[in-house]
């Protein structure tokens, strides 16, 4: 409970928008109260003045026409009793009249009589003095009613003003929130500067500072990628020297035991070479994609090209490899990326499919998505491992294979780069064997 | 045949030079670009092997200057950089082929032979992949160790298409294009029929089928 309170109070103290809204609301309310009080007071006063004027006019009128209130008029059951105006001769004791002191001075005054307060206008002249009186509470009530009427516009306007203020604050802060949402929605490789043109000038320095930081991060990431690429390139030269020496050694006449060991050595060199190639591929595909290189690529052509490269490996293991018939699909990608992706998937499939197994490639359309699928008859990947196999250098234990551990990481990086998805499943769900890798890419609309 | 090797790495240079000598080439080895240009100016070579990453004047500049001097010597680039555009720039700049580090000597020697053959214009008319060879003059196909077999026109056209680039997979429609002229009516199953007869004549392993894609001859034996 305390925690919630603390969080709310910290949100209020840190949210500029909320603070601005609250202060605006407070200011509007204060102004409304002050203005309302003033309006009420002046309307109240005016109503009194008006009533005094009325008393004065009645008195003048009554004195001219020698009028006094008839006694029976002052019955308490008169329906309009409250608003009644008494007109009587001062000094003369009239039945039903008010007990007003005879020595009241001329003019307006408040007088207590019969337990009530009255506003009395006394007018002299013609030898007799005329008093016109009205109950103060009635006068006050009428004045209050008319003064309260002046408050109605405030009561309507204040909520409207509060809503308008809240809306304005929201609109003013919208560019900031929009920018934050846009940054949130970004892929992790996207280090493009934040568009600060639409931002308010108070927030702009922040955005600019973040942009400078982004630029530095991008530089550092580029450097790191370049370092990986350079290191891999540099390693190629000594590896070449090593493999050439081993090859020359193999050409000499060696005892049988030395030849076996040399064969192992050359296998090791070969592994180093393919690891370097994979590292370079990974470094390349982790770079942000170059939109100029993406185009509509026919998938079947890529399948064929990759099959031409990898068929010798499949033949060596007597794997029946083929493409399921169907119409071709074009996807939006760079041709090199797509070939690298298919090559890594197929290389994995050949690696983990046992001797005499089967691999099927297929491609089809699902709505606007081009689906590329590779199914093999290998052991498959357990569900618990599926999220981890995309990590670089992660290998499923006990697979007994000498892969680089980078194949699926490369596939994943390419998918991220060209905006696709990759899913793993069992090829044979019932028996829980075989791997089915499904890659979803945006299809080109013909 | 005299070969100039331009390579700055001592271990690779020595190994390649020795391997070239083993393969009966006269091999000279220089370690930087300027020396390479000076040497080619006063000595005729049948082939230049050029490493791109050289100290001082790099391989691209050497290549550009060599071609600017109108030296048509066949030239093979050796590079550790495999960025596609860099390779293409090498070929655009007048290189005849490239090998990627790390390479095997056998591959380098094969590419050297191919480049010299292409440049010399004496490309052998025989097609083959080590398993089967085809003589365009007589339309005879020979499986290693067997007597030549006479092929029909269409059988020949189909096998020739498959042997032009061993290892390449050709689809049915591509094969149909090769065996039928314009305006000729394509018979259904003609490709399957021709492959069947070719396999009967030359052995089932000569032409391989890749499910859903097409047919191919294997790449080298």
Image: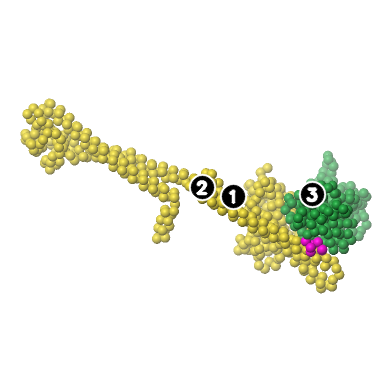
Disc 2 residue crowd, few under 14, some 14–19, many 20+, Cα 10 Å: some
**Disc 1 marks which residue?**
A192
Disc 3 residue crowd, few under 14, some 14–19, many 20+, Cα 10 Å: some
Secondary structure under badge 3? helix
**Disc 2 marks which residue?**
A204
Q: Mark 1 touching mark 3, by CB under 8 A?
A: no
Disc 1 residue crowd, few under 14, some 14–19, many 20+, Cα 10 Å: few
- Of residue B4 and residue A200, the one placed in the foreground of this image is B4
Q: Are discs 2 and 1 both within one chain?
A: yes
Secondary structure under badge 1? loop
**Disc 3 marks which residue?**
B64
- Of residue B197 and residue A110, the one placed in the foreground of this image is A110
Q: Mark 2 touching mark 1, by CB under 8 A?
A: no
Indicate the quadrant containing the C terminus of chain A: top left, top right, bottom left or bottom right.
top right
Q: Are discs 2 and 3 both within one chain?
A: no
The numbered mark at residue A57 is none
Q: Colour of chain B?
A: green
Chain hosting mark 3: B
Residue interval drawn in magenta: B9-15
Query: Is B13 colored magenta in this rendering?
Result: yes
The disc, 2 or 1, on the residue closer to the chain's N-terminal end is 1
Please give the count of numbered marks on the rendered protein. 3
């Amino acid at each position: 409970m305390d925690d919630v309170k603390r969080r709310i109070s910290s949100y209020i103290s840190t949210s500029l928008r909320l603070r601005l809204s609250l202060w605006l609301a407070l200011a509007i309310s204060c102004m409304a109260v002050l203005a309302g009080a003033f309006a009420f007071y002046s309307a109240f006063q005016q109503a009194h003045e008006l009533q005094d004027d009325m008393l004065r006019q009645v008195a003048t009128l009554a004195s001219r026409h020698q009028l006094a209130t008839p006694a029976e008029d002052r019955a308490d059951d008169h329906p309009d009793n409250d608003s009644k105006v008494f007109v009587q001769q001062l000094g003369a004791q009239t039945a039903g009249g008010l007990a007003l002191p005879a020595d009241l001075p001329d003019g307006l005054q408040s007088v207590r009589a019969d337990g009530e307060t009255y506003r009395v206008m006394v007018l002299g002249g013609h030898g007799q003095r005329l008093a016109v009186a009205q109950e103060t509470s009635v006068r006050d009530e009428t004045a209050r009613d008319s003064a309260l009427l002046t408050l109605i516009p405030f009561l309507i306007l204040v909520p409207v003003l509060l809503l308008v203020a809240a809306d304005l604050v929201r609109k003013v802060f919208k560019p900031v929130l929009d920018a934050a949402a846009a940054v949130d929605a970004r892929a992790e490789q996207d280090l493009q500067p934040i568009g600060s043109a639409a931002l308010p000038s108070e927030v702009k320095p922040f955005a600019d500072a973040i942009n400078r930081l982004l630029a530095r991060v991008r530089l550092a990431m580029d450097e790191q990628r370049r370092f990986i690429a350079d290191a891999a390139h540099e390693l190629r030269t000594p590896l070449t020297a090593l493999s050439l020496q081993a090859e020359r050694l193999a050409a000499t006449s060696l005892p049988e035991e030395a030849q076996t060991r040399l064969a192992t050595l050359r296998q090791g060199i070969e592994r180093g070479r393919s690891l370097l190639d994979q590292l370079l591929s990974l470094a390349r595909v982790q770079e942000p994609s170059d939109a100029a290189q993406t185009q509509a690529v026919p998938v079947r052509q890529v399948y064929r090209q990759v099959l031409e490269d990898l068929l010798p490996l499949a033949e060596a293991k007597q794997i029946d490899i083929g493409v399921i018939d169907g119409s071709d699909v074009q996807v939006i990608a760079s041709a090199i990326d797509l070939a690298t992706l298919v090559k890594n998937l197929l290389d994995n499939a050949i690696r983990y499919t046992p001797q005499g197994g089967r691999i099927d490639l297929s491609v089809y359309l699902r709505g606007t998505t081009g689906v590329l699928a590779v199914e093999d008859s290998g052991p498959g990947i357990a569900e618990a491992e599926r999220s981890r196999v995309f990590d670089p250098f992660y290998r499923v234990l006990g697979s007994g294979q000498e892969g680089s551990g980078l194949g699926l990481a490369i596939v994943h990086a390419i998918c991220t780069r060209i905006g696709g998805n990759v899913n793993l499943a069992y090829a044979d769900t019932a028996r829980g064997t075989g791997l089915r890798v499904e890659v979803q890419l945006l299809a080109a609309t013909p | 045949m005299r070969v100039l090797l331009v390579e700055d790495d001592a271990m690779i240079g020595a190994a390649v030079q020795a391997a070239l000598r083993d393969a009966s080439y006269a091999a000279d080895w220089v370690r930087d670009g300027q020396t390479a240009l000076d040497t080619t100016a006063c000595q005729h070579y049948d082939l230049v092997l050029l490493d791109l990453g050289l100290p001082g004047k790099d391989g691209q500049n050497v290549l550009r200057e060599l071609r600017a001097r109108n030296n048509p010597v066949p030239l093979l680039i050796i590079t550790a950089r495999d960025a596609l555009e860099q390779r293409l720039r090498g070929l655009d700049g007048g290189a005849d082929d490239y090998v990627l580090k790390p390479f095997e000597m056998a591959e380098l020697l094969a590419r050297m032979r191919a480049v010299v053959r292409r440049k010399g214009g004496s490309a052998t008319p025989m097609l083959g992949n080590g398993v089967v060879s085809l003589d365009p003059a007589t339309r005879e196909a020979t499986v290693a160790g067997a007597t030549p077999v006479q092929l029909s026109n269409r059988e020949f056209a189909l096998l020739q298409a498959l042997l032009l680039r061993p290892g390449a997979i050709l689809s049915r429609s591509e094969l149909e294009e090769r065996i039928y002229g314009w305006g000729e009516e394509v018979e259904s199953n003609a490709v399957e029929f021709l492959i069947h007869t070719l396999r009967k004549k030359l052995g089932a392993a000569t032409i391989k089928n890749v499910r859903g894609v097409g047919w191919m001859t294997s790449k080298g034996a």
